[in-house]
Amino acid sequence: MTDINGTQPGGAPDEERPGTGPVIRDRRLIDPETGQVRRREGEPPAADAQTTEGSADAGQPPADGPGAGPEDEPHPDTTLAAERLEEMRRMQAEFVNFRNRTQREREGDRDRAVASVVEALLPVMDDIHWAREHGDLAEGTPFAAIADKLEQTLERFGVKRVGEVGEVFDPTVHEALMHMPADSPGVELPEGTTEMTIVQVMQPGFVVNDKVVRAARVAVADPA
């Protein structure tokens, strides 16, 4: 029987024992007939090695799979806190919008109430205007004091009279009933006037916080 090193039990090599021929061993790594890599003695088959490697990898989740990086997922409490914070911000914004809208509506209701009172007092205000124009409201008279107090009280509620001689004509608060030439008798324009100007007030106008209750009815003139 020949051992791994090519010797027989007697210890002498095969080629040296009498009655035997030379022994040729093929130790090439590549099989010349099949072209496959030969397995060394004591080495596991290639298929077994691949199977072993594949089974070892099969127990591990892929690097980019669903199980990868569980520490990167937010905690449920963190997600819930973010949702509650977003809801709180949205409710706060809705409350601010509601408060502003309510404030605007309240101011509008107030202005409409004051405007209705001014409309009822328009005849009285016209009488005060004409009395002042004719000199019947001399300073120090009881009627002049009453007229001043009435106008000051209305001013506290945002009521303002518009339409004065010498003012630049504004179509949003003035109504021009007459257009007079600049050289007409009695027409005097302020020096340096470059725009259409009020030269006579026929009926004063009133506004409540920029809301026109009645436009001033006036006569206007253009500069020469």
Image: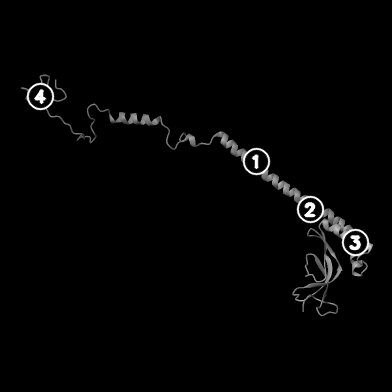
**Given the image, on which type of amino acid does mark 3 rest?**
Ala
Q: Mark 3 points at which residue?
A: 147
Circles 4 and 3: CB atoms closer than 8 Å: no
Rendering coords of residue 223 (x, y %): 77, 77
Please, what secondary structure does the residue beneath circle 3 have?
helix
Tell me the quarter of the image containing the C terminus: bottom right
Q: How far apart are marks 2 and 3 (CA)?
A: 27 Å
* Circle 2: element type: helix
Q: What element carries label 1?
A: helix
The CA span between labels 1 and 3 is 55 Å
Which residue lies under the disc numbered 4? 14
Q: Name the residue under label 1.
A: 88
Q: Is residue 92 left or right of residue 111?
A: left
**Amino acid type assigned to the residue bearing label 4 in the image:** Asp
Residue at (49, 37) in percent of width and height: 72
Q: Alpha-carbon distance for marks 1 and 2? A: 30 Å
